[in-house]
Amino acid sequence: MDRYQRVEKPKLENPIKENEIRVTTQGRMRNYITYATTLLHERGSDEIVLKAMGRAINKTVVIAELIKRRIIGLHQNTVIGSTDITDTWEPLEEGLLPLETTRHVSMITITLSKKELDTSSTG
């Protein structure tokens, strides 16, 4: 792949809701936990949604457990899934064809709420 460079795709502008926290591998756990507790206590939000993909899933589960330990009485609903991400690569040298690679990436959505959530959900 040293003869190719990845083409950046334009990102779809999906606005992030105020109570949605997207966890990444680079972010600090302390910052996510502080923001979540601020949403639940000071801003009067009834629920928060933690979302992550790939390697950030482990960090998201730990963050959810720490938040539940700090704020007693939270209800949790967890949804796991996966998605396919297609990367496009352009050649740096002449004579090579453009490539497309597809990755299968896991994802998780954890909803923490002060109110009781859907009891029929498996998560």
Image (cartoon, rainbow, N blue to C red):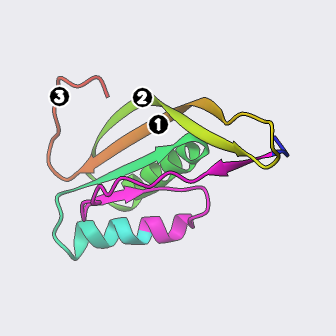
Q: Is residue 48 above or below residue 35?
A: above
Q: CA distance from mark 1 to mark 3?
A: 22 Å
Regarding mark 2 in the picture, which secondary structure is present there? strand
Quadrant location of the N terminus in the rendered image: top right
Real-space CA distance between mark 2 and mark 1, rounded to the nearest whole angstrom: 5 Å
Question: Which of the two residues, 27 or 104, is positioned nearer the viewer here?
Answer: 104
The kind of residue on which mark 3 rests is Thr
How far separated are the C-alphas under marks 2 and 3?
Answer: 20 Å
Residue at the bottom extreme, as displayed? 42
Dominant secondary structure, magenta? loop
Q: Is residue 74 visible?
A: no
Q: Quadrant of residue 89?
A: top right
Tell me the residue that label 3 is attached to: 119
The residue nearer to you, when weighing 118 against 66, is 118
Q: Residue at x 52, y 35 (%)?
A: 85
Circle 1 Cα neighbour tier, 10 Å, few/some/many (<14 / 14–19 / ≥20): some
Quadrant in the picture for residue 46: bottom left
Q: Residue at x 45, y 65 (%)?
A: 32
Q: Decide whether residue 82 is among the magenta residues.
A: no
Tell me which segment is drawn in magenta: 4-33
Crowding around mark 2 (Cα neighbors within 10 Å: few <14, some 14 to 19, many 20+) is few
Amino acid at dot 2: Gly
Q: Earlier in the sequence, mark 1 or mark 3?
A: 1
Q: Earlier in the sequence, mark 2 or mark 3?
A: 2
Residue 81, labelled with which disc? 2
Q: Earlier in the sequence, mark 2 or mark 1?
A: 2
Residue bearing the label numbered 1: 107
* Marks 2,1: beta carbons within 8 A: yes
Q: Where is residue 104 drawn, in percent x and y?
A: 56, 28
Q: Answer left or right for 36 relative to 116.
A: right
Residue 86: x and y in percent read 54, 35
Q: Is residue 4 visible?
A: yes
